[in-house]
Structure formats: structure tokens, C-alpha cells
Image (cartoon, rainbow, N blue to C red):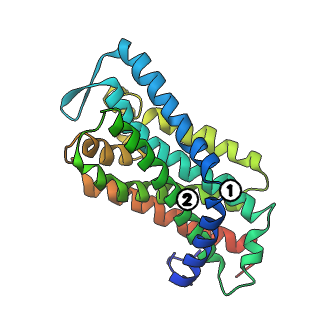
Amino acid sequence: MTLNPFSNLTLRGIASVWLRNFLVWRKLLVPSLVFNVAEPLITLVALGYGLGLLVGRVESNGSALPYIVFLASGSVCMSAMNSASFEALFSGYSRLGPQKTWEGILNAPVSLEEIVAAEILWAGFKALFTGAAILLVARLLGLAETAQLLLVWPLLLLVGICFAAMAMVFTVMAKSYDFFNYYLTLFLTPMMFLSGVYFPRSQLPEAIQGAVALLPLSAAVDLIRPIFLGLAPETPMRSVALLLGYALLALALAQHLVRRRFGVT
């Protein structure tokens, strides 16, 4: 396993694969928008306005927030996570396996490492697109009034790249779509409920709060929710370092596994 995930990478190779995915996605923009945006918006409105009437206000970042505002700021992070993960898992595997798109791309002067990196970058873009749409709706609903929301965009890209890289590890190991049930059920779903999206992490038992704080979705929430509220994150460097660390380790592992899958030494 190489210690340098950036070996054998060129900007031209990554850009060509990214552009190919973009041109295909452009033809499917409307159904993609519905899939990636409609579901989190329905959840936000249903839980925010429905459950929010029962919950009332929630303590977060030193102030009491209406529950729908608390949920909206967490939903942006969750939507970016889900969009990047599903793109890297299901769409990525379709191009790797059934459609054999990766094999076709390898006939061009593009390496396996560049394909993996481009797929991760593309999934990160999808996360940015989805998260930005949720931010726009939150702004229209009056849930986010701060001009600092533009600062969230590069963070959404980082969050998307992080989760896409981790998902890509499972994609290059998969023999069928059913394999992804392990990742979704045993990792993404528990993290979604533990990382402060639906309720403050301070409500968890103290024994697990420290471990939960190390999860990538927790880092995303710690970065984005304060900015959503017009505040500064308490530990921005720590959160960014966590996301970058997960992304780089997963990228290196995915590159190693894909070379083994294709029999490349």
C-alpha cells in the first residue's frame, strides 16, 4: 500500500474523468435533483415543523434554537454525506462493475489512481450541489439569515470528498450492490443518529461522547452548524484535520485496493 495517495496523479487525467461524469449527469439533472434534494427537504419540513412543535427549543452553541433551525443546520451536513456516499457507492460501482466504464477509460492515458481520485472529486461535487440546494431552501424559509453561508460551500465540498473517499473503499471491494448494506447499515445510519444531526451530542452518555466526537459527520456538524447560525466554529482546525485525515487515509486505501482488484502491482 503506497504511503503517497497522490502518486501517479495528473490534473489532466482527473479532470477528463470528472468532465465525463459531469456530461452524463447533466442529462439526468432533474431526476438527480429530485432524489438528492427532495427527500432531505421532506424530512426537514416534516420533523422540523411536526416534531419541532413538541420539542420546542434546543440548546446548541450557547443559545436556545428552534428545533427546525437546529435540524436544518444538521440536515445540510447529512445531505452532503448521503449524496457523496450514494454517488461513490452505487453510481461508482456501476461504472466500475456492470457498465465497465473504468475499463474503457483505462484505454486512454489515465491511471487507476486518477480514476479513483476523479470519482471521489465528482462525488464531492454532488455533495456540494445537494448541500447548496438545502442551504438555499433554508434561506428561503427564513431559517438561515447570515451572509456567512457562502463560507459553508467549500466545507461541503470537503465533507463530500471525505465521505466519498470512505465509500470508495467499499466500492472497489464490492462484488455486488448488496455489499453496500454493511456500510450503510452498520456505519452511516448509526453515525447519522449519533453525530448531532437530530439532537445535541451532549444528550449522549458521557462514556461515548468522546468517541462520537471523532466521527467525520460530527466534525462536519461542528464546522457547519455554527456558521449556519452566524457564529464561528469552536475548533475549526481540529474538525478540518479530522475530515482531511479520513479522506487521505481512505483515498490511499482505495487506490491500493483498486490496483489489487485489477491485478496492477
Badge 1: how crowded within 10 Å, few (<14), some, or many (20+)? some
Residue 156, compared with residue 12, is above or below; it is above
Residue 7: percent from the left, percent from the top?
53, 82
Amino acid carrying mark 2 in the image:
Ala
Residue 134: percent from the left, percent from the top?
43, 42
Q: Which picture quadrant has residue 68?
A: top left
Question: In this rendering, would 40 be left or right of 28?
Answer: left
Q: Residue at x 25, y 42 (%)?
A: 226
Gap between marks 1 and 2, in whole Å? 9 Å
Determine which residue is flagged by label 2.
123
Q: Which picture quadrant has residue 167?
A: bottom right
Residue 178: percent from the left, percent from the top?
76, 45
Instruction: Label 2, secondary structure: give it.
Output: helix
Q: Which picture quadrant has residue 158?
A: bottom left
Label 2 near label 1: C-beta < 8 Å?
Answer: yes
Determine which residue is flagged by label 1.
91
Amino acid carrying mark 1 in the image:
Ser
In the rendered view of the protein, which quadrant contains the C terminus?
bottom right
Instruction: Label 1, secondary structure: give it.
Output: helix
Q: Residue at x 29, y 49 (%)?
A: 149
Residue 200 visible in rendering: no
Instruction: Residue lying at the far top in this picture: please name it.
Output: 54
Q: Nearer the viewer, residue 104 or 258?
A: 104
Residue 56: percent from the left, percent from the top?
30, 16
In the rendered view of the protein, which quadrant contains the N terminus?
bottom right
Which one is earlier in the sequence, the residue at label 1 or at label 2? 1
Residue 214, compared with residue 3, is above or below; it is above
Residue 211, numbered circle: none
